[in-house]
Image (cartoon, rainbow, N blue to C red):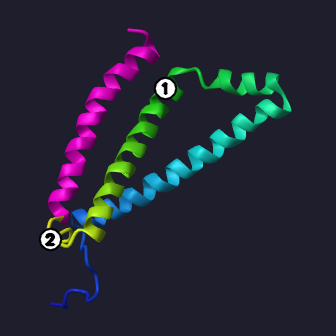
Amino acid sequence: MSPKPAGTLYRGREGMWSWVFHRITGVAIFFFLLVHILDTALVRLSPEAYNAVIGTYKNPLMGLGEIALVAAIAFHALNGLRVILIDFWSKGTQYQRGLFYAVMIVWLALMIFFVPQHLSHVFGF
């Protein structure tokens, strides 16, 4: 039987998944902001082009994409607070697993509130 690898902290537990999701959501938010800045900059070049691009966003598929965006931002923000607590609170590492579950519970509560409200606007029901 081979020994466990030395130097790995997470070994597939909550801390590792938190790290992975934080990176994925951060990259996704970055690319959203890049596209948002570019499409907003169109207004200076041509208001008609800007209106055409914004018009393509008004469809149910983009409405579902907005749910994914809000989910990513909410998780990234809440997990960022968790990282701050772990870094600056002397007992943060001791409670990092519980903090992860707290982040997930708060994130889920926010999404349970947001998703039905948003879907009613997207699909008009």
Q: Residue 19: percent from the left, percent from the top?
A: 35, 64
Is there CB contact under 8 Å for labels 2 and 1?
A: no
89 relative to 23 in the view: left or right: left
Q: Quadrant of residue 59?
A: top right
Location of the N terminus by quadrant is bottom left
Residue depicted at 15% across the width and 65% down the height = 95
Residue 17 in sight from this viewpoint: no
- Residue 69 belongs to magenta span: no
In this figure, what is the number of numbered marks? 2
Judge by depth and name the residue closer to the eye, 26 or 87: 87
Q: Position of residue 105 (x, y in %)?
A: 20, 44
Residue at image position (70%, 35%) is 40
Pick whichever of labels 2 and 1 is earlier in the sequence: 1
Do we see residue 106 in this rendering?
A: yes
The residue labelled by disc 2 is 94
Give percent across and percent down for residue 6.
26, 89
Asked if residue 118 is positioned above or below residue 97 in the image, the reply reads above
Q: Main secondary structure of the magenta part?
A: helix
Q: Amino acid at mark 1?
A: Gly
Q: Which residue is mark 1?
A: 63
Residue 90 lies in quadrant: bottom left
Horizontal side of residue 14 vs 29, given as left or right: left
